[in-house]
Amino acid sequence: MFPLSSYVQCRRRTTIFEAELNQKKREKKIKFRERRKPDTEARTPARKQNNTLLFGELYIRAFVMADLNPTLTFNNGYKVPIFGLGTWKSKPGEVMQAAKDAISSGYRHLDCALIYGNEPEVGEAIKAKIADGTVKREDLFITSKLWNTYHGKSLVIPTLKESLTNLGLDYLDLYLIHWPMGYKEGGEKFPTDENGKTLYSDVDYIETWPAMEEAVEAGLVRSIGVSNFSKDQIERILQIAKIVPANNQVECHPYLNQKKLIDYCKSKGITVTAYSPLGSPDRPWAKPDDPLLMDDPRIVGLAEKYNKTPAQILIRYQIQRDVIVIPKSVTKSRIEENIQVFDFALSDDDMKTIDGFDCNGRFLHLTWVKDHPHWPFNTEF
């Protein structure tokens, strides 16, 4: 559940803001009534009366779509679209169409993982959109992740190849160690004893990293990185690494803005990807009284100010921090809506306001394995 102290802190800030927001809504309604009517004569001519205009609009739309995905550059020179589609919790039977809709809408970055259980469907979507000419393989950036039961050095490349087979690809753009904690190998992906306690592996992730580097040397992946790693854990990787991690993917949103970790990663040339940027409201262990980030009246107020959705405000917040962001959705309208974040910018004051929402409000805490020696949340960041 959401930590009680964090919940109380977030809720207190939210309650204070609600009164201010209601006052602003009243003022906004008054101003709206005073606006003059639009000049209908200045409207754009109808498309059916001007085929040249229609062609121009289509050209502009294609140009804009090509520019929908600004990129960041990894420390090895490869580029990554700053915006992508997350696929965690996307159910089989839904994710293939979601991935197709995303690519059709201009997405060029798909975030996957073996443990999500839906890579084959994502692969079918990729195959279909390449076949119909929407994209080429080189237009796409595909990420997958090494699950906790495959940390043994001899298991890394075979597991990566399994993801490649699932996705129908010859190489990945990015491969991440999913978590620093290793689980018992050779059986279930969530191995437990008779009491339901997770069984651990004694493999240290610094033994895993050299095999990740071998995957790069073998041409199976272009860039490698980590996920859910703390500063101290990254430091341990850097001490033995021939290849510096290109990316650290972590939970990140206004309630957990990860500023210190992001600043540290940037100082080492490591990009950061924000998962659960919308607060992961559909996480399986959510409690009824957990705060809902997208319902926070402060976020709702900003959405009204910019004429955007709360989700678009949360996505734009990460982009302006140079943080890669991968919101998940399987709903076509939301997939299309989420990428419409490159036509506005949050003001510096609003960015600082959102920064102030931080209350260490971690949603994905994995407290049931907190006794693992490599559980990543024992330190400040």
Image (cartoon, rainbow, N blue to C red):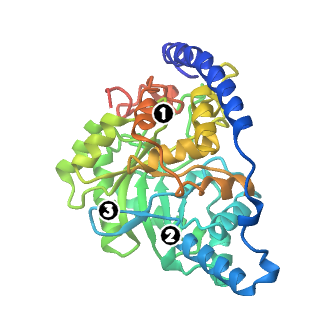
Neighbor class of circle 2 (other Cα within 10 Å; few <14, some 14-19, many 20+) is: few
Mark 1 and mark 3 in contact? Answer it, CB < 8 Å: no
At x 54% / y 41%, what residue is drawn? 314
> Hey, which residue is sitting farthest bottom in the picture?
52
Whole-Å distance between the Cαs marked 1 and 3? 24 Å
Q: Residue at x 56, y 31 (%)?
A: 193
Give me the residue at 72% from left, 80% from top.
54
Kindly identify which numbered label has been placed on residue 254.
1
Identify the amino acid type marked 1.
Answer: Pro
Question: Depth check: 70 or 255 in front?
Answer: 70
Residue type at mark 2 is Asp
- The answer to whether residue 127 is seen in the rendering is yes
C-alpha gap between disc 3 and disc 2? 19 Å
Q: Residue at x 63, y 44 (%)?
A: 307
Question: Which callout, 1 or 2, points at the residue further toward the start of the chain?
Answer: 2
Query: Disc number at residue 67?
Result: 2
Residue furthest out toward the left: 239
Q: Mark 1 or 3, which is nearer the eye?
A: 1
Q: Quadrant of residue 179?
A: top left
Q: Which mark is residue 74?
A: 3
Query: Residue 105: x, y in percent?
Result: 65, 66
Query: Of marks 3 and 2, which one's residue comes earlier in the chain?
Result: 2
- Toward the right, the furthest residue is 48
Q: What quarter of the picture does the C terminus occupy?
A: top left
Point out residue 346 in the picture as x, y percentages from the top left corner: 47, 44
Tag 1 secondary structure? loop
Q: Quadrant of the N terminus?
A: top right
- Depth check, mark 3 against mark 2: the one in front is 2
Q: Amino acid at mark 3?
A: Phe
Nearer to me, 195 or 119: 119
